[in-house]
Amino acid sequence: MSESNESPVTGVTPHPPLQKYYQGEPQRRGFVTGLFDRTAPHYDWINRVMSLGSGVRYRRDALRRAGLVPGNRLLDVAIGTGLVARAAGDILGDGGQVTGVDLSMGMLAQARKSLPVTLVQGVAERLPLADGCADVVTMGYALRHVTDLESAFREYLRVLKPGGTLLILELTRPAADSATYRFTRFYLHTIVPLLARLGPGGPESQTLMEYFWDTVDNCVPPATILAALADSGFTSPRQNVVHRVFSEYVATKPRD
């Protein structure tokens, strides 16, 4: 099932247009989807390099902190190759259920190779799923790629059951005048793209990682994300920061 690729920008965009990569907002989705389609076969390798192999444990711990338990129904938006979904599967057990949504057919093709879950093509702002179908909704490091934060958040609210939990994993830019920022920028803007270029993905993977950093560097601040969550109807939105750059945004759908 697939929804329209066009979603109007009516609220808060995660970052301004990056004209190094595309001309304006109408071209952004096509650029991002094409980039992920082309780099999908090498994405897991790139992720291991970027995270120095620590990503598997961190994702599992973040899911547990958010309250994921065996038997839950989980919807992973922008599932990619399935990194968050695989970590969730370790917790959910045989009684749990995972559904993944992604616009990139290349990413979905990679996910199908290793994940026995339901996979659907679609966009965050217009999910092709029923109301109240999930106990937990997750999104791993893809919030910077939506067109409108509030449209996406309202969709997450819609597909969650009353009392359900939203977990968004993201990288947050440290304060620009800090040593943490200088190190993070050097690592993600210089070292990781160079290693990506030297790896199996070549120049396309380098572009992906350069774009990754530029979206982090230009992303709206956490306060804007938390406000958009509240304005979209979530209760108790909060940010948990790990190692100064990893943000876990957690919010709850009201029970009434």
Image: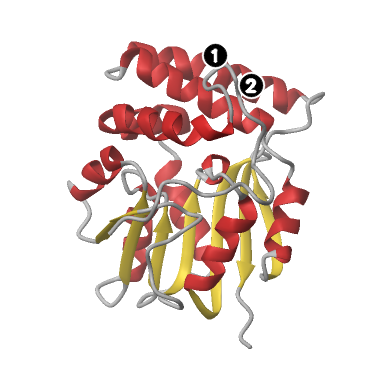
Instruction: Please tell me which residue is depicted at 54% across the width and 13% down the height of the picture.
Output: 190
- Amino acid type at image mark 2: Arg
Instruction: Please tell me which residue is depicted at 36% across the width and 49% down the height of the picture.
Output: 102
From where the camera sits, is residue 218 visible?
yes
Quarter occupied by the N terminus: bottom left
Q: In x, y percent, where is residue 116?
A: 20, 59
Instruction: Please tell me which residue is depicted at 27% across the width and 57% down the height of the picture.
Output: 119
Front one among 125 and 89 = 125
- Label 1: few (<14), some or many (≥20) within 10 Å? some
Check if mark 1's residue and mark 2's residue have beta carbons within 8 Å: yes
Residue that numbered label 1 is attached to: 190
The image quarter in which residue 19 lies? top right
| In-image side of 91 versus 143 (left or right) | left
Quarter occupied by the C terminus: bottom right
Instruction: Please tell me which residue is depicted at 38% across the width and 68% down the height of the picture.
Output: 129
Front one among 200 and 224 = 224
- Label 2: few (<14), some or many (≥20) within 10 Å? some
- Amino acid type at image mark 1: Thr
From where the camera sits, is residue 52 visible?
no
The correct choice, above or below, for 163 with respect to 247 in the image is below
The image quarter in which residue 178 lies? top right
| In-image side of 108 versus 203 (left or right) | left
In the image, farthest residue toward the bottom:
256
Q: In x, y percent, where is residue 200?
A: 27, 18
* Residue 128: image tag: none
For numbered disc 1, what is the local secondary structure?
A: helix
Q: In x, y percent, where is residue 42?
A: 29, 28
Does label 1 or label 2 sit earlier along the sequence? 2
- Marker count (numbered): 2
Residue that numbered label 2 is attached to: 185
